[in-house]
Image (tube, helix red, strand yellow):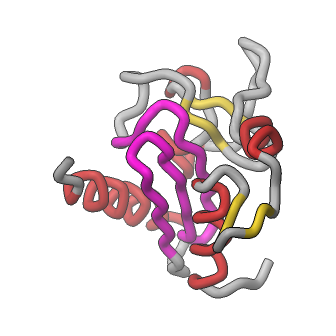
Amino acid sequence: MVSTAADYLRFSQMLLNGGELDGVRILSPRTVALMTSDHLSPGTPIGLGGQFGALMPDLEQGQGFGLGFAVRVAPGHNPYPGSVGEFYWVGATGTTFWVDPKEKLVAIMMVQVPLTQTRHYRSLIRNLVYQALTG
């Protein structure tokens, strides 16, 4: 996929808005809800490997998987900050985005780093973003 950070932000904002952007309905709210709901049955193995750490969709970490996104489904299981209902995706070389509807938050990080360093930068950006919230 090729995109700009600005386009990725607009896409993410549209999802946060329940399918609407700049007054134009792009997806129905039901479609967004379906996309961002967990569709994994309990005990479903995910097997993405360890390089994604606690951002890997893993039921033990309070993560599930929707239609195109990992979804946080339970509080208190994940060492990274976030809210139940947030959804996100991570790229293999450092890119990441997440939408946290509870906080009305969209975050995007577009970097290209070796696979062995991606976990550090994803953890760093999440911690910095949530520590900056004041309300």
Establish if 32 lies above or below 26.
Answer: above
Establish if 22 lies above or below 64.
Answer: below
Magenta span contains residue 36: no
Q: In which quarter of the image is residue 94?
A: bottom right
- Residue at left 61%, top 55%? 17
Q: Please give left or right for residue 96 compared with residue 104 in the image.
A: right
- Residue 78 in the image, given as x and y percentages of width and height: 41, 31
Q: Please give left or right for residue 112 compared with residue 19 in the image.
A: left
- Residue 91 in the image, given as x and y percentages of width and height: 64, 64
Q: In which quarter of the image is residue 3?
A: bottom right
Establish if 41 lies above or below 67.
Answer: above
Tell me which segment is drawn in magenta. Answer: 81-109
Residue closest to the far left: 134
- Residue at left 64%, top 87%? 4
Magenta span contains residue 88: yes
Q: Quadrant of the N terminus?
A: bottom right
